[in-house]
Amino acid sequence: MVRDYDISNNEKQFVLTALEQNIRLDGRKLLQMRDVHISVSRDEYGYAEVSLGKTKVACRVTAEITKPYEDRPFEGIFQISTEISPICSPFFESGLTTGGKQSNDEILISRLIEKAVRRSGALDLESLCIIAGSKCWAIRADLQFLNYDGNFIDISSIAVMVALLHFRKPDMEIDGNNVILFDEDQRNPVPLSILHIPLCFTFQFYNPNDDEENIKGNLNNELVLLDANLIEERLSLGSMTLTINKNKELCQMVKCGGLNIDASMIMNCCQHASNLVDDLTRKIHDVIRTDSELRKNPVEKELQVVNQRET
Amino acid sequence: MSIVIPGDHFTLETGTEVVLGPNLQTTGNIANPTTAGYLVQTQTGSSSLAYVEADSKRYMPAAQDFVVGTIVGSFGESYKVSLANFSTPAVLGFYAFPNASKKNRPRLKTGDLVYARVASVDPDLDVELECFDATTGKEGGFGHLEGGFLFEVRLAYARYLLRHQDAPTPYKTPSNV
Amino acid sequence: MSIIVENDPLDQVDGSASFEFGATKVMSSVTGPIEAARPRNELPTKAYLDINIRPSFGVPSTRETLLEHKLGQLLPAVINLDQYPRQTIQIAVQILKNGEPNDYTARQLVAIINSVFIALINSGISLKSSLMATCCSISTEGEIRTSPTSSELASSVSHFVVVYSIEDQQIDNLLFCDGLGTFKQQQLFDVLDRAASEILLNFQQIRQAIASHVSQNYVWKA
């Protein structure tokens, strides 16, 4: 049995009527995102907490040395785990109660994140190779969904990317077939090689008219909104996720069924997402930069000041 | 008023009639709070009242409470009404409306909101709701709610609003679901 | 030990709490009583406890299942399960910071038990008494340390997780004791005594956190 939120017709009607008048429950514009708050851990590498309104996700990146896959001897391994725990809402059931079966929402979220981050080549897998065919780094990103208020997809893509950028793996040296790892006190750990920062933007669609107008008509007045909260997400008639980076490269576009949407509207969504991606990318870089500034030891800071004076 | 937590036993006065309210368990004349909250003890005439005023999010039905619920389906001759997300639905009979008969009864759809009164609560049975006044059998303002919006508030605040007519409200229509 | 408790940080569940002591941090949530997800979880006379623990990294393994089992043995001693027949009480735990080597679970179990207790209080579920957990270790010299750090644990010969119920501001019953390693009978008794005084001391902080949360929920009473 699948549990769901019981949303009354009154709430549904209220939200939809308001949307038609360009008003959302939390006072946002239709295409406005909630404020993104990003915080990273001070005392360890590769831990980020991101919140989007009340939606909250944490991501932890860990690394270990393993044997690469047989068919890809020159590449490292990168895995993202996106199991949703009922801690964020009883709506998401644990694997135990469902007998190991994931809910459709959960599968969709993990597929989208997988495609957005892993298959778009955000992480340079070849740089993770240590000795071809025998040793490589296995990077693992564990997403922890803490609170659900809609839009897990977008926030997950931010959390994974921030955690990857924040992560440092131990420096090492190769001596023949031996690998020597240095701990933090011996040598500064090294960041991962991130090729680009793909970010997801999820649009939800609503139809103020009837089905016939949607399929046959030319009105094109379907409502589009970005970063839906819980009730908006539960009432949505269709959604589309765009993954885009700040070079304006569209990495992924997913629309699984739902409301029919005109091509020109999809183009508008792409345009809007590409406007937002710059700001968000800058925000992520700011967080990472502030963190690495704070981590520098006093001696290093001193040296940097001296260097700057000389040039 | 003192804040108590589970395990803070206190002795009830013997010889008088003591009415026990929510969140208390007794063995003999020793009472034990079952959750954290304010301990309230009042004396009216020969009988006294003791209960623990505690806040929570999930509504636990209590007889004679006025509630707002969402119809989530029907089976046999009754509607299933959800009083809180993911809780076991309560039951509202087709004929638990004023002057309802086989031919003439409100037809409610899934997703409709109803304002009702909790008629009976037994942990081993389904919670039963009724949409008529218990004393007169007349309408009493219950039934299908149309339009508007449902605001979820914490239970302590809902009870506060119900008891204080002059309570400051950020919203005009509180609900105690 | 310095304890940091956060009351009800989560929105969608009925009660939640995070418990942090030293380098260990755990977030717990309680939802219930809710409708059973599957008919087989419907127990005719009492509530079913659905416990779910997730590690700070990696997929849940036998390690988490063992922790779930330990929690499942402890909780029926304090929750009035018979008040909620056929219902489910869902407890989800997320370990945020291990704070100890990966082979150990002592510090995490302490944080899990304490955070679940506070989350249960916040959810309003009927409890029999209050409880608190603490851990102790015995060093190679036979010295007992309460709330050992990661390195103290790694160099100890044995370690214990002890849970006592607290009634009328006093230590009441020993609810749970889990020891691993070599120790003598007298050492175990010493550990239990030390744990009891440690719990009595530290429970004041938990009580304070619960009381301030109650008064926050009733701002208009102030």
Image: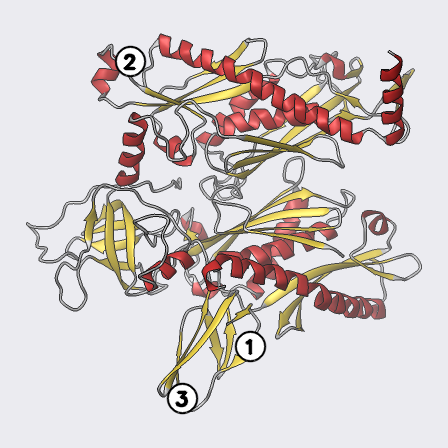
Residue hosting label 1: B9
Seen at 58% across and 49% down, the residue is C28
Q: Are marks 1 and 2 on the same chain?
A: no
Amino acid type of disc 1?
Answer: His
Residue C166, image x, y percentages: 64, 70
Is residue C131 left or right of A73 when viewed as pictured?
left
Q: List the residue tagged with mark 3.
A: B16
Q: Crowding at label 1, few (<14), some or many (≥20) Cα neighbours within 10 Å?
A: some
Q: CA distance from mark 3 to mark 2?
A: 74 Å
Nearer the viewer's eye, disc 1 or disc 2?
2
Q: Which secondary structure lies at badge 2?
A: loop
**Which numbered tag is attached to residue A220?**
2
The residue type indicated by label 3 comes to Thr
Asked if badges 3 and 2 are on one and the same chain, I answer no
Query: Is residue A142 in view from this perspective?
Result: yes
Which residue occupies the foreground of this view, B102 or C25? C25
The Cα atoms of the two marked residues, 1 and 3, are separated by: 19 Å
Quadrant of the image occupied by residue C200: bottom right
Q: Earlier in the sequence, mark 1 or mark 3?
A: 1
Instruction: Looking at the picture, tell me which residue is in the foreground, B147 or B62.
Output: B147
Report x, y in % for residue A152.
Answer: 50, 30
Q: Mark 1 belongs to which subunit?
A: B
Q: Is residue C192 left or right of residue C82?
A: right
Question: Percent x, y for residue C69?
Answer: 62, 53
Name the image quarter holding the N terminus of chain A: top left
Q: Quadrant of the C terminus of chain A?
A: top right
Q: In which chain is the residue bearing label 2?
A: A
Question: Who is closer to the viewer here, B77 or A171?
Answer: A171
Q: Circle 1 sits in a helix, a strand or a loop, which is it?
A: loop
Give the chain letter at badge 3.
B
The scheme the figure's colours follow is secondary structure
